Amino acid sequence: MTKRAIISDIHGNIEALTVVLNDIRSQGISEIYCLGDVIGYGPNPRECIDLCQDFKVCLLGNHDNGALFDPDGFSSGAEKAIFWTRRELEDTRVDHCEDRWNFLAALPRTHRDGDCMFVHGSPRSPLNEYVFPEDIYNERKIERIFGFIQKYCFQGHTHVPGVFTENCRFFSPAELSYQYTLTDQKVMVNVGSVGQPRDNDPRSSYVVLEGREIEFRRLEYPFEVTRDKILQIPELDDFLGERLAIGH
């Protein structure tokens, strides 16, 4: 039975990505699906793009799209980071500049594989819609989103991992003991963030899918290294580095 690793929201954090990829390889997993936001916020966009080009599937995230075009609806800190990232990718003195832009430009917004749908934000608006745990109290929103789901949907974007059910419930990985079995019921699974977790846990998050079995994995990485790089780049807000220590 094929094992797949599903990752998302790397955000230019090469230290976190390296730890996650090493963990994936240690399990003998060769199929990696990335749900977008390879870049943005973090200090190593080029290196992260280079690694992602080897994945089986990589989707377009809103930060990837913001670098290609103009950031839409971003906070001032996120917008500044995107403009800095764009300048890094436009530096023609660096090898493979054009290859990186071509890779980003070709990224799809959705991917389907059997009963599974893969998006960055939500099945209703793959690039930009946020679905937070507290949205379970907005039954109309959840009902409409699940109307776009055939069976199972995997997403990122909020950086908060967990499982949404069609009857408006949300379960964090800890509540599930980091294991979940897919049934005949529709679910939406947020795989969390590799490079910038926001569930008050600074460890990188990703998911392993084998058949109907899901495992949420959390990994420590040297966030201090990433943080210090960010603090040394004036165009990147210090907050983008400091938040890595608290996972929020």
Image (cartoon, rainbow, N blue to C red):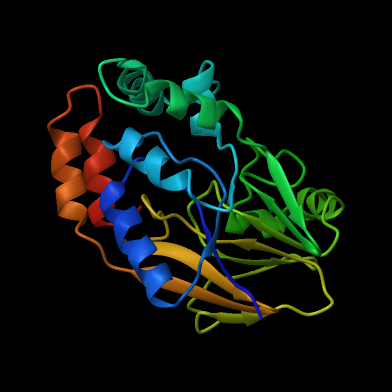
Position above or below: 202 against 148: below
Q: Count the marks.
A: 0
Pick whichever, 21 or 131, lies toward us: 21
Q: Residue 133, how many percent across, how many down?
A: 59, 59
Q: Residue 43, how many percent across, how many down?
A: 26, 36
At 86% from the left edge and 59% from the top edge, which residue is drawn?
150
Position above or below: 24 against 118: below
Q: Residue 24, how many percent across, how many down?
A: 42, 69
Pick whichever, 41 or 75, lies toward us: 41
The image quadrant that residue 93 belongs to is top left
Position of 214 compared to 202: left or right?
Answer: right
Position above or below: 246 against 23: above
Q: Residue 49, how many percent across, how many down?
A: 41, 39
The image quadrant that residue 184 belongs to is bottom right
The answer to whether any part of residue 247 appears in the image is: no
The answer to whether any part of residue 246 appears in the image is: yes
Pick whichever, 3 or 233, lies toward us: 3
At 79% from the left edge and 50% from the top edge, which residue is drawn?
145
At 30% from the left edge and 16% from the top edge, which residue is drawn?
91
Quadrant where the image shows the N terminus: bottom right
Position of 217 compared to 236: left or right?
Answer: right
The image quadrant that residue 154 belongs to is bottom right
